Image (cartoon, helix red, strand yellow):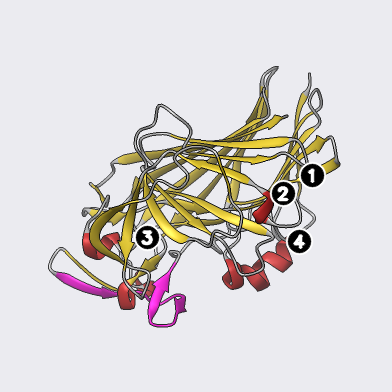
Amino acid sequence: MPFSVSINDKETFPIITLKDESSNIEVEIYSFGALLNCFAVTTKSGRKNIIDGFSSPADAKENITKTFKSAKLSPFVCRMHKGEYTFGNETHKIQKFYLGEEAIHGLLFNAPFSVTDSGKTETEAFIRLIYNYNNSNEGYPFPYSMQVEYALHENNTLSIKTVVVNTGDADMPLSDGWHPYFQFGETVNDLQAQFNSNTMLEFNNHLLPTGNFIAYKKFDTMQPFNDTALDNCFLLKDHLSPACTIKDEHNGLQLTINADESYPYLQVYTPPHRKSIAIENLSSAPDSFNNGIGLNIVKPYEQITFATSYQITLL
């Protein structure tokens, strides 16, 4: 059987490895934050991990808030204006992490997920992790459970499914997303990119949506990335085509990101070092608890699912 699952529980936070021996694909996941830390493939230039990750779970725990690499974004995504929102006629204040005056990237980026199930078949290897949130002191008094399933399939494809259940007795606001950084060669300038979007959300100077949508067609076909600088959110045209495709001709590989209807937004960020690029599937616009753009309202005991996948193609 070409697929395998192994769990290293000698660390404070277990490390899970999924492998496809037939294609020499390897995926590494930390139970800390349910982080994707490695998606490795052998290219014509040698072995390549396309995830800009951490050296260890301890490194992730210490440094996650510096970059939020591979962070799970929940129950809100990106920035929230001054960390405040009103829901059900009550005003709440997020008490976790701020960048300037804005709360950012949710509450679960450093959550200690637990492994609940794992397995392998002739066509895939999978792991399921769960975290139960119930901390009204953080400014989000809505208990919920989150299960994250990573599955490595044939054709160099990694799927990620998130299932959230409202375990409380009241409606709750919810957004979901991921914050992986992808790395290829020395710089993202050498890449080519295509987004399944020709519409960008207009941001103010706090990187919060104004409510307006503006045309952006630079990458509606495959184009050289060059020195493009982005920290922007895009509305996908549909889910019939990949949300994003990145091509690295030097290393001979292509990354294709396919999101289902649960992730209609794509956030793209180029850090100043330009050695990697953050490509984030989002269920809503940033600050959706205030602007309502794409916000999910989950009823008591209701279940909601979010799904995306990453596929590597050797060129």
| Mark 2 element type | loop
Q: Using the image, determine if residue 314 lies above or below residue 60.
A: above
The label number, if any, that marks residue 184 in the structure image? 2
305 or 67, which is in the foreground?
A: 67
Q: Is residue 308 magenta?
A: no
Quadrant location of the N terminus? Answer: top right
Q: Position of residue 282 (x, y in %)?
A: 41, 50
Q: CA distance from mark 3 to mark 1?
A: 32 Å
Camera-near label (2 vs 1) is 2
Q: Secondary structure at mark 4?
A: loop
Q: Which residue is mark 4?
A: 56
Answer with mark 4 or mark 2, whichever residue precedes in sequence.
4
- The residue lying at 77 percent from left, 58 percent from top is 11
x and y, in percent, of residue 249 in the image:
72, 39
Q: Earlier in the sequence, mark 1 or mark 4?
A: 1
Circle 3 or circle 1, nearest the eye: 1
Q: Which label sits on residue 76?
A: 3
Q: What amino acid type is highlighted by mark number 4?
A: Ser
